[in-house]
Image (cartoon, rainbow, N blue to C red):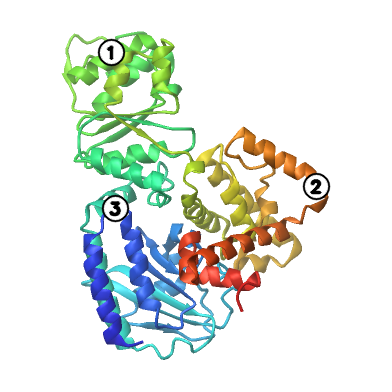
């Protein structure tokens, strides 16, 4: 690696990075890492940033896409922990017994003996990120100059500090602070165009006090958007109160929202603050707002218009400063037409409507989300690593996800458990300490994926009936489909780099897949 050429490339990328906005940062980071490893013999590399107690990749090369959705907790990954504590370049002996965080995630697999190094990225004395390089061949990284790596680390640290000053990074850090129990995805899963558009709107309206209506199908992650609106606003230091309107008994809804005085009704033995008063100075999230009874809706409208509440049993009005975010999976406009929701309240709540797209419209995010959920299951089950086979990845991308992100989370939890049980039954229990592979049999997706139209479905059924005797085994059919896709893309692009871009794949993964399919020597 020529240090001068390398640093010149990174300086140019540093300038470009400073001009990027929003999700384009991910593409800029990929460019930084691609330039860094271009002159090395690394088979897998990652650029990670500090995320809570661990690190999250912002760019990867030669690793499955789902790795970008994982968070690597330092105390659970001794190699990463050693790199974090190292004063400079940290090299591991080829036969080092410490488990590698990427072991088992590659189809080729990282052999027990391989080359590995890492460089910590620091801001002063504080760890802010890390660069890791792995090579399947021992000694392949020995010629890398430590001085050049440290110079690269210094410039990468500058890039990282710059990115943290961008407005979009501010929103991402706000999302990081959302409680895990309410926001399982956090930063994961908005690489797709529909989610980029949504998050741009979230960033725009978060800085205001406008009421927001977050709507979408069940399981798409509406609560995550509600949390993002709060943590990205000037109210982030104030309370965030979430109330599920559907879970409130009809007789107690008014008291729960607006509070009551002692003796206001039978059983009211003391004064009670309502949710509006609890959220004073912050944000109140009204989940399942479409379930509010009609008779209570005028009182909610009054609070939104006047900013005042009147607790039950009190003759005093109390001013509250609350930003309301309403969440629903119902079509409230249709509810208005049907007479089940007040039109004036609907318009007040939907001053800025946000629709969260269903997962079937954002398939580019599936692998990121899958990687995040697999890491959660890896920790919970105590296994070395969890990865998806090529066939399992294809099955996830072909599924229509009627239950959206929540269905994906539950599906992978079940599949992880089944994969672990299979290994325990067929092999030594120690086998799971290395890596578990989830295959299509563990996913159990048996019904055909959703097609674009009924006519398309009829055409598929007719074609399948006419060629039933020609059906191939699933593995062969999948390989044939992948072979055709790659061949067509290669014919159009005339280069493997262009083919990888057209197919949305990491170049290293594409080369390995093409080699396995017999398309590349």
- 142 to the left or right of 123: right
Asked if labels 2 and 1 touch by Cβ distance under 8 angstroms, the answer is no
Q: Position of residue 520 (x, y in %)?
A: 60, 75
Of 296 and 504, the residue lying toward us: 504
> Of label 3 and label 1, which has the lower sequence position?
3
Q: Residues within 10 Å of mark 2 (few under 14, many from 20)?
A: few
The residues tagged by marks 1 and 2 sit, at their Cα atoms, a distance apart of 62 Å
Q: Quadrant of the N terminus?
A: bottom left
> Of label 1 and label 2, which has the lower sequence position?
1
- 69 to the left or right of 122: right
> Of label 3 and label 2, which has the lower sequence position?
3
Q: Nearer the viewer, mark 1 or mark 2?
A: 2
Q: Position of residue 137 (x, y in %)?
A: 54, 85
- Residue 274's image quarter? top left
Q: Nearer the viewer, mark 3 or mark 2?
A: 2
Asked if labels 2 and 3 touch by Cβ distance under 8 angstroms, the answer is no
> Which residue, as the protein is rendered here, is positioned at the far right?
469
Q: Position of residue 253 (x, y in %)?
A: 37, 17
Disc 2 is placed on an element classified as helix
- 36 to the left or right of 404: left
Q: Residue at x 78, y 52 (%)?
A: 471
From the viewer's perspective, is residue 480 above or below residue 42?
above
Q: Residues within 10 Å of mark 3 (few under 14, many from 20)?
A: some
Q: Which residue is mark 3?
A: 22
From the viewer's perspective, is residue 477 above or below residue 96?
above
Of 507 and 49, the residue lying toward us: 507
The residues tagged by marks 3 and 2 sit, at their Cα atoms, a distance apart of 48 Å
Q: Which residue is mark 1?
A: 299
Q: Which residue is mark 2?
A: 468
């Amino acid at each position: 690696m020529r240090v001068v050429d390398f640093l010149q490339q990174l300086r140019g990328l540093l300038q470009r990075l400073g001009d990027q906005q929003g999700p384009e940062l991910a593409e800029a980071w990929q460019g930084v890492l691609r330039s860094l490893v271009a002159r090395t013999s690394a088979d897998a590399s990652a650029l990670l940033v500090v995320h809570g107690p661990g690190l999250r990749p912002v760019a990867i090369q030669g690793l499955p896409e789902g790795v970008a959705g994982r968070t690597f907790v330092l105390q659970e990954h001794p190699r990463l922990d050693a790199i974090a504590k190292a004063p400079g370049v940290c090299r591991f002996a080829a036969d080092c017994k410490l488990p590698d965080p990427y072991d088992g995630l590659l189809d080729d697999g990282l052999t027990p003996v391989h080359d590995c190094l890492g460089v910590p990225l620091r801001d002063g004395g504080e760890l802010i990120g890390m660069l890791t390089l792995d090579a399947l061949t021992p000694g392949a990284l020995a010629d890398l100059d430590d001085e050049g790596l440290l110079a690269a680390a210094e410039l990468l640290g500058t890039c990282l500090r710059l990115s943290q000053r961008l407005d979009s990074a501010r929103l991402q850090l706000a999302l990081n602070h959302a409680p895990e129990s309410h926001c399982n995805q956090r930063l994961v899963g908005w690489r797709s165009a529909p989610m980029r558009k949504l998050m741009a709107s979230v960033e725009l309206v978060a800085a205001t006090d406008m009421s927001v209506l977050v709507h979408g199908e069940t399981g798409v992650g509406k609560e995550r958007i509600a949390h993002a609106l709060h943590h990205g606003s000037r109210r982030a230091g104030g309370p965030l109160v979430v109330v599920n309107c559907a879970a409130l008994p009809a007789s107690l809804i008014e008291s729960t929202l607006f509070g009551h005085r002692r003796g206001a009704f039978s059983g009211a033995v003391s004064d009670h603050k309502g949710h509006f008063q609890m959220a004073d100075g912050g944000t109140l999230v009204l989940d399942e707002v479409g379930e509010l009874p009609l008779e209570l809706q005028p009182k909610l409208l009054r609070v939104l218009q006047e900013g005042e509440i009147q607790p039950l049993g009190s003759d005093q009005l109390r001013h509250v400063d609350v930003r309301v975010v309403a969440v629903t999976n119902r079509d409230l406009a249709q509810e208005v037409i049907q007479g089940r929701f007040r039109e004036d309240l609907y318009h007040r709540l939907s001053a800025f409507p946000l629709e969260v797209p269903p997962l079937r419209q954002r398939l580019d995010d599936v692998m990121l989300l899958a990687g995040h959920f697999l890491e959660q299951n890896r920790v919970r089950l105590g296994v070395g690593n969890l990865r998806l086979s090529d066939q399992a990845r294809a099955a996830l991308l072909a599924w229509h996800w009627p239950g959206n992100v929540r269905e994906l989370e539950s599906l992978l939890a079940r599949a992880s458990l089944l994969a672990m049980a299979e290994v325990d039954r067929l092999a030594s229990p120690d086998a799971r300490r290395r890596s578990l592979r989830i295959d299509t049999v563990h996913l159990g997706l048996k019904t055909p994926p959703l097609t674009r139209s009924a006519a398309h479905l009829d055409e598929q059924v007719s074609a399948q009936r006419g060629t039933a005797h020609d059906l191939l085994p699933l593995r062969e059919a999948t390989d044939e489909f992948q072979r055709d896709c790659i061949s067509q893309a290669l014919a159009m692009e005339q280069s493997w780099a262009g083919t990888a871009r057209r197919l949305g794949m990491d170049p290293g993964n594409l080369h390995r897949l093409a080699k396995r399919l017999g398309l590349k020597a």
